[in-house]
Image: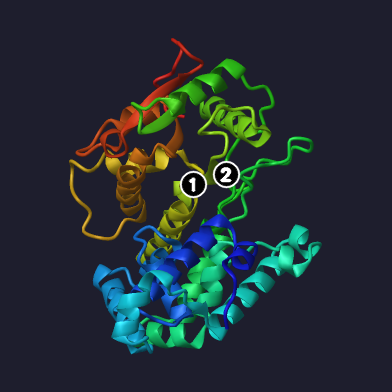
Amino acid sequence: MRAGASSLQQTLTPEAASVVKQSVMLARRRGHAQVTPLHVANTMLSSSTGLLRTACMQSHSHPLQCKALELCFNVALNRLPATSSTTTSTTFHHHHPSLSNALVAAFKRAQAHQRRGSIENQQQPLLAVKVEVEQLIISILDDPSVSRVMREAGFSSTQVKNNVELAVSLEISSHPSLSKPKEPNLGFPILNSGLKQTPFSSLDSVNNEDVLSLVDALLSRRRKSTVVIGECLVTAESVVRGLVGKIEKGEIPDPLKSAQFLSLPLCSFSHQCKDDVEQKLGELRCVLNRCIARGIILYVGDLKWTAEVTESYDDQRRKYFCPIEHIVLEIGRLVSDFVESGRFWLLGVASYHTFTRCKMGHPSLESLWGLHPLLIPAGSLGLSLNSE
């Protein structure tokens, strides 16, 4: 079945269309007469930071497992019928592979899923619905030929699809309505946290100067991570709430204007087993890879929980699994991996006493995360040394 490129472009978002275009080029290079779901899956898997590869890594974290999957897809592509070598060599630049029936069916499934997933899309004709890359991945994973290759490499297509759907379930709008401001969504449903679990105070009066100081601190290229230090925790939390309010209303400069605000209170990990912690870290990395282009502010809440762990680093290393310690180290790796993008910000709050504890230990939390303190109110001399 041959489909025109122009009609295809009308049904895909630019990102999804780019994936399909690369898949067409792959089919041309291999001399294949048709572009199949195998070509698309192989193209998406080849991106080291792509959503499909990240979802696969969640199922099997060992990098060699993904290499095995790439090899299996390569073998499957080698099995596809190709045009003759003479024809391929003479007509390569004029060869335009058509879309296979299976790939067209995958596009239709993705379009139907996209339409069902949004109230706005349900009010549009089917042909007007743009397929996003996430729905394209899910639909491709439903293809029998792709599922078979995944199974040969030791992957469950269903499990990988579930990992992708978890990432898609992150519903934080990057362009909130200015005419009807809504409650700031601090939730990260994948990590079972939300506004009700985030211990922000109900303090209404927020010093605008303090909020602007926080914005300036986040925009500073010299800072990897920022901790808001208040005379009491309520003061620091109110400034973060003010930041979220400005993001929701669009009253903030780029690149923060379109950033996603993800809440990850570390206290929620204090009694979790290693498997649960690893799963949630994988989900977090999956979401970061998906949303980093728009920018992400990862809010970890009160650093008291981490300070209690890291200050004992120089005393003795725990011989048993400590979830908070594991999270601290993994967040340090996230900072190293994503901070150079200029689109990732780590944010926490602390009392003065807590921050002094963050400076203890070898390595200290301050050095692990590259923490930079922001005193609230600015220039305050009344910060207490007492524990909160």
Residue 265, disc: 1
Q: Are marks 1 and 2 in contact (CB under 8 Å)?
A: yes
Q: Residue 363 sits in which quadrant?
A: top left
Image vertical order of residue 174 relative to residue 223, above or below = below
The kind of secondary structure element at disc 2 is loop
Left or right of residue 339: residue 107: right
In the foreground, 378 or 252: 252
Residue 198, disc: 2
Image vertical order of residue 32 relative to residue 250, above or below = below
Q: CA distance from mark 1 to mark 2?
A: 7 Å
Q: Tell me where residue 15 appears, x and y as whole percent.
A: 52, 57
Q: Tell me where residue 230 appears, x and y as whole percent.
A: 48, 23
Residue type at the position of mark 1: Pro
Q: Earlier in the sequence, mark 1 or mark 2?
A: 2
Neighbor class of circle 2 (other Cα within 10 Å; few <14, some 14-19, many 20+) is some
Q: Which quadrant: the N terminus?
A: bottom right
- The answer, for residue 153, to whether it is visible in the render is no
Q: Tell me where residue 265 appears, x and y as whole percent.
A: 49, 46
Residue furthest front as drawn? 90
Residue at image point 56% right, 75% down: 139
Neighbor class of circle 1 (other Cα within 10 Å; few <14, some 14-19, many 20+) is many
Residue at image point 44% right, 59% down: 286
The kind of secondary structure element at disc 1 is loop
In the foreground, 248 or 126: 126
Image vertical order of residue 117 relative to residue 223, above or below = below
